[in-house]
Each structure stands twice: as C-alpha cells, then as structure tokens.
Amino acid sequence: MIHRAAAGRKLADHLLKVISACAALVGILVLAWILAVVLQRGAAAISWDFFFHRTLPTGEAGGGVGNAILGSAVLVGLAVVIGVPLGLMVGVYLSEFGRDTRLGTAVRFSANVMMGIPSIIVGLFVYELMVVPMHSFSGWAGAVALAILMLPVVARTSEDMLQLVPNSLRESALALGAPRWKVTFHIVFRAAKVGLLTGVLLAIARISGETAPLLFTCLNSPYWPTTLNGYVANLPVTIFIDAMQPYDDLVRLAWGASLLITVGVLALNISTRMILRRSGHE
Amino acid sequence: MGDRTFRWLTASCAGIVLLLIVGFFIRLVLSSRLSLGQFGWRFLVTSDWDPVSGRFGALSSLYGTLVSTAIAMVIAVPLSLVIALFLVELAPPALRRVTGTAIELLAAVPSIIFGMWGFFVFAPFMAKHVEPALGRSLGFLPLFHGPPMGIGMLTAGIVLAFMILPYISAVMRDVFQMVPAVVKESAYGMGATTWEVTRKITMRYGVRGLVGACFLGLGRAVGETMAVTFVIGNNFDISASLFAAGNSIASTLANEFTEAHDSTGLYLSSLVELGLILFVVSFILQVFAHLWLKSLTRKMGAGL
C-alpha cells in the first residue's frame, strides 16, 4: 500500500519534470521558428536595391526600402533626442529627490502603468494632439509618439541604475561643496554610466518595431524623407502595408524589412545583456 | 544652478508623466464626445459597424477582444507556470540560462514580426493541421464548427498566448524565487517530491503573486495590436466558432483608422471611443495588477 503510493508520487513528479521541460521547449521552438522564417524569407529580399532604392509605385517591379530605413532612423533618432533627456530627468527626480515623496510615488506608479498601456493608445493620443490641429500627418508627430513610449522605460531603468550608486559617493561630493546638479551629472551619472546606457538601448529596442503609433501619426510614404512636416516612410508601417498587397515583390520587401527590424531589436537586446554581464550587474 | 532650482526642474519633468496619463484620458474623452453623445451606452451593446449610414457599435470588437484574450490566457497561464517552475526548480543551470534567455528574447520580438509570422506561416499551419484535427475530434461543439481557414479567433488567441507568455513567466519566476528556501527545504526534508513542494508550498505561498502575474499578462493581451490585426481576419460578424474571422478593439482601430474620414466626423469619433474603452480597460488592469503586486511585495519584504 505504502509502496504503491510512493510509486504514484514519483510518477507525478516525473510527469511534472517532463511537462515543464516540454513547456520550456515550446517557448524556445516558437522563438526559433519565428527567427528561422524571418531569416530565410528576409534574406531572399536583401540586395543592393533593397538598401539604396526607394519604394516604387504599387505593381512596378524592383525598388527597395531605402527611404523607410532612413525614415525609421530619423524618427527613432528624434524620439531619442526628445525622450532620453526627459526620461533621465524623471529618473533623477525619482532616485535623488522623490524616494518617499508623494509625487515620487505617484510618478513611479504612473510610469509602471504607462509601460503597460497599449502603444496604439499613445498613437491615438498624439494623433488628436498634433495631427488634427496641424491638419497633417507628420514625422514630428511620429517622433513624439515614440518618445512618449520611451519615456517610462528610460525613467524607470535610470532610477534603478542611479539607485545602485552608493550614497557615500554623493555625500563626499556634497561635502566638498558641489551643488546637487553637479553631483548628479558629474559624479552619480559617471558612476552609473553603463546602467544608464543599457536603459537607453533597451528603450530604443522597444520602439524600433512599434507600428501602431506610427500608423496614426506619420503613416508611410513612397518617397525619401526630405521633410518631417509630412508623411515619413518607416520600416514597421512599410511591413504592415506591403505584406497585405497582392504583389510578390512587395511581400518580399516586407520580409526583408522584417529581417532588418528583428536583427536590430535582438542585437540591441543581446548587446545590452552582454554589457550588463561584463560590468557585473544582474 | 541652485539645489532648489534643480530639484524643481527634475520634479516638473516627473510631473509630465502624470500629465500624460491624465492627458490620454481627457483627450480621448473630448475627441469621442460626438460618438458618446450620439450612441450613449448603446455603443457597447450594438454590433452595427456601418460607415455609410453612420451607425456604429463596439460589440463585435469587444467580443473579439474578450474571446482572443480568453484563449490567450487559457494557453499562456499554465504554460508560463510550468516554464517558471522549470527555470526556478527543475532545470540544470546551463539549461536554465539558455531557456531564460530564449523566453526573454521572445518578449523582445516586435508585435509586427509576430504578425508576419502568424499571417504567412502560422495561420496556414493552423488551417492545414490543427484546425481540421480539432474539427474532427471536437466538431460537435459549436466552438469548432466551420471551415478551417487559419485566419480567425483561435489563431489570434494562440499567437497572443506566445506573446504574453514571457511577461507572465517572468513575474511568476520572481514569485517562486521569493519563497524562502528554508520553507521548501523543510518540505523536501520530510520526503516531499518536487511536485508536492510546488503544489503545496510554493504555489500556496505565492498564490497572490501568481494572480498578479496573470493580470499583468491580461493587460498586455487586451491591447496587443499588430499581430492580432494580421491574423484575426477583420470581420464585424459575431460567430460562435473560434475558426471564424473576427476583430478586436485594437485591430479595428489599426484597420479602419486611415479610412475613417466622413463629413460628420462620427466615424472617427466612434473609433476614438473604441480607443477610450481600450485605454480605460487596460488602465484599470494595470493599476490593479501593480497595486496587487505592490501590497504583496510589502508583505513578503522582497523586490519584485
């Protein structure tokens, strides 16, 4: 009797081990499946024209996504210029001044909540805020939408990273008579340099593939981005639009663009991980 | 720059975060007031979506969001639970690092890439292999009636499940790690197996954390846009079958928005009202999940 119960318990235990290993395998396989498909189909699209030509009118053979690559780089760059300083300042407040203040608690909580708000809502908000009053879709609106998405990520990671800097460092600088801003930017920032950098890289990785907010703000364009006052070509929306076209050429371009985004985002993630590991975090 | 100025400067930057959250809500309410006034509460219970005659209702989008999210949760929650368990208790260290990294990278894959894979690869796979098999074995249920098209609620739900799985399992992993080793070791010392320790000690100890993890995943699933837009089929009919095409709030927004220009502005306003509903729902889910996990962290005295 006792013996049989023990056997049953052992069986259940083994079953759990098998099931959990299978579940982990499912996760790994899905990732591998997606990567394999993107690599295989994306590689077929890569050519000189793919990088250096602009999108041609629907149905015309050839063409590339050069305009979208440039446009995406400009949009993300501009979002970094707007979002990173702002996010760092929020991080400084949370870490240096607002540990236990009411504002600090509220902002920290809001930033956490904001990271979970669907990006399409941010797109809708910026559409109503900028596109409607300006009567035009614009690259500016797209960059602002991406910057808003970056803000809570940069703020929360930089807060965490600034927190890791030992207080004695701040105190010794303050004791020498340095003002707070000097202590923060020259001493604390320097000590937290690597951590802050990884926060920014992760935020860039997060917005590089964002499609929904751009759909509502700068949409897409077949032309080279010469101005930010109108439609600006970008990779994610190019994928969304081209993938739905009944032309093999355009679908191939969509796969090529998918490959670029996937490689870019994963490379950012992996390099962040390596930087953190090398510097002894985690 | 004086210390006070600097503090004030950073505080006002921090205030922007609060302003944004409030701004989302106010802006969306203002922009949807036309539709709010025209349809009132009926917006939530009618499924008409007719831009020509100007009649709009959110029911089919609400239904699609609900069903696709439910499918995603049914698949993702148990899967995340055992994956978290694998990572914390069962896997040998080398395998733990590989698996953990793979799951985290899965979270980094952009939504639109899931959409491309879902539309061109996974949906045909579903149509060819999974849905016919389900139809044969469970076809007596209305859920699995109809032609296996691949594109539809079921595929959208499964793709969503893969997308939220890393988020849920990450929090669950933290919860498992918060259980004091002493408690587990005493159970092992009495001869309990891993499964028994998990079921009777770890899960019971961390049950609130596990629930919090589910709510965070739910919050993500509700607003996931591009992947769902690719595979759900964009259809305003409500069907009992999971094989049928449908839509969700987010997919309706993504699909219809660029076309939504009518003389009265009612079409656009109705879409913004859909966005407002999505914002309110995901806001409540996020606030609830974070408050829940925060109170838990305070109680258990560890960072989550």
Image (cartoon, rainbow, N blue to C red):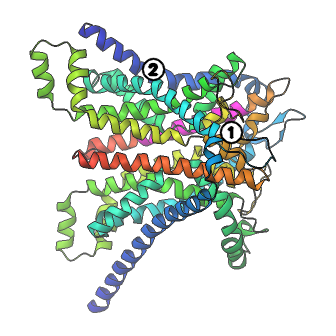
What amino acid is at disc 2? Ile
Q: Residue B227 location in percent, x, y?
A: 62, 51
- Tell me the subunit letter for badge 1: A
What amino acid is at disc 1? Arg
Q: Residues within 10 Å of mark 2 (few under 14, many from 20)?
A: some
Q: Residue B286 location in percent, x, y?
A: 48, 39
For residue A230, side relative to residue B191 (left or right): right
- Note whether A24 is above or below B62 in the view shown: below
Closest to the camera, between mark 2 and mark 1, is 1
Confirm whether circles 2 and 1 share one chain: no
Q: Residue furthest front?
A: A48
- Circle 1 residue: A54
Instruction: Please name the residue shown 66% across and 50% down the image.
Output: A254
**Any mark on residue A91, and which?**
none
Q: Secondary structure at mark 2?
A: helix
Q: Residue A280 location in percent, x, y?
A: 21, 47
For residue B209, side relative to residue B76 (left or right): left
Instruction: Please name the residue shown 44% across and 61% down the image.
Output: B80
Q: Residues within 10 Å of mark 1 (few under 14, many from 20)?
A: many
- Tell me the subunit letter for badge 2: B
- Note whether B169 is above or below B61 in the view shown: below
A8 is within the stretch colored magenta:
no
Q: CA distance from mark 2 to mark 1?
A: 38 Å
- Per the rendered image, the range of residues in magenta is B271-290
Instruction: Please name the residue shown 31% across and 58% down the image.
Output: B176
Residue B215 at least partly seen: no
- Circle 2 residue: B16
How many numbered callouts? 2
For residue A258, side relative to residue A82 (left or right): right
Q: Main secondary structure of the magenta part?
A: helix
Instruction: Please name the residue shown 71% across and 53% down the image.
Output: A251
Q: Please say if the residues under marks 2 and 1 sit with CB atoms less than 8 Å apart.
A: no
